[in-house]
Amino acid sequence: MYRLRVIDSFASAHFLRNYEGKCENLHGHNWRVEVYLEGEKLNETGLLIDFKEIKKELKSLLNGLDHIFLNDHEYFKKVNPTSENIAKYIYDKMKERFGNLIKSVVVWESDNAAAEYFE
């Protein structure tokens, strides 16, 4: 089994709905995102998938989240923009491109707090 990991980041603001505490107020994060892909078979070049393909797709996706107010994003108008839900959103979008090779997405909201989504 082979596992690949690509890391990127984005910055955005949000607040949590139905939450009592500091996070109910508008605040921002420099989010760090880790995407994991796994597979058993390599292509004729000896790659599971080219890193540049993963990086390109992830960068394109994160550009849509970068420097915005997440609560105004179409998806997060209906879904609370928690770290958990951001991880699921990124997972689902990456799965549209890479299918079952996507195994998990980790979203770090700080140096010591992260949420991971996997099926």
Image (spheres, helix red, strand yellow):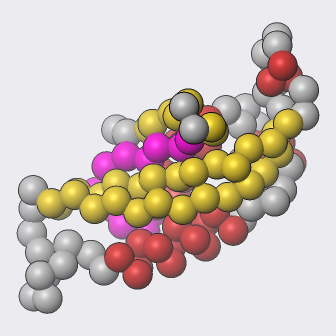
Horizontal side of residue 12 vs 58, given as left or right: right
Most foreground residue, 113 or 118: 113
**Residue 107 x %, y %:** 54, 43
Residue in the image at 67% along x and 58% along y: 10
**Would you place residue 23 above or below residue 11 in this image?**
above
**Residue 68 x %, y %:** 83, 56
Most foreground residue, 71 or 25: 25
Most foreground residue, 28 or 96: 28
Residue 50 in which image quadrant: bottom left
Q: Is residue 105 magenta?
A: yes
Outermost residue toward the bottom? 45
Residue 84 in which image quadrant: top right
- The quadrant of the picture occupied by the N terminus is bottom left
Residue in the image at 83% along x and 32% along y: 15
- The quadrant of the picture occupied by the C terminus is top left
**Residue 92 x %, y %:** 49, 52
Q: Is residue 49 magenta?
A: no
Outermost residue toward the right? 26
Residue in the image at 63% along x and 39% along y: 109
Residue in the image at 61% along x and 66% along y: 61
The answer to whether one can see residue 64 in this image is yes
User: Bounds of the magenta span?
Assistant: 95-108
The answer to whether one can see residue 85 in this image is no
**Residue 105 x %, y %:** 44, 47
Outermost residue toward the front? 111
Residue 78 in which image quadrant: top right
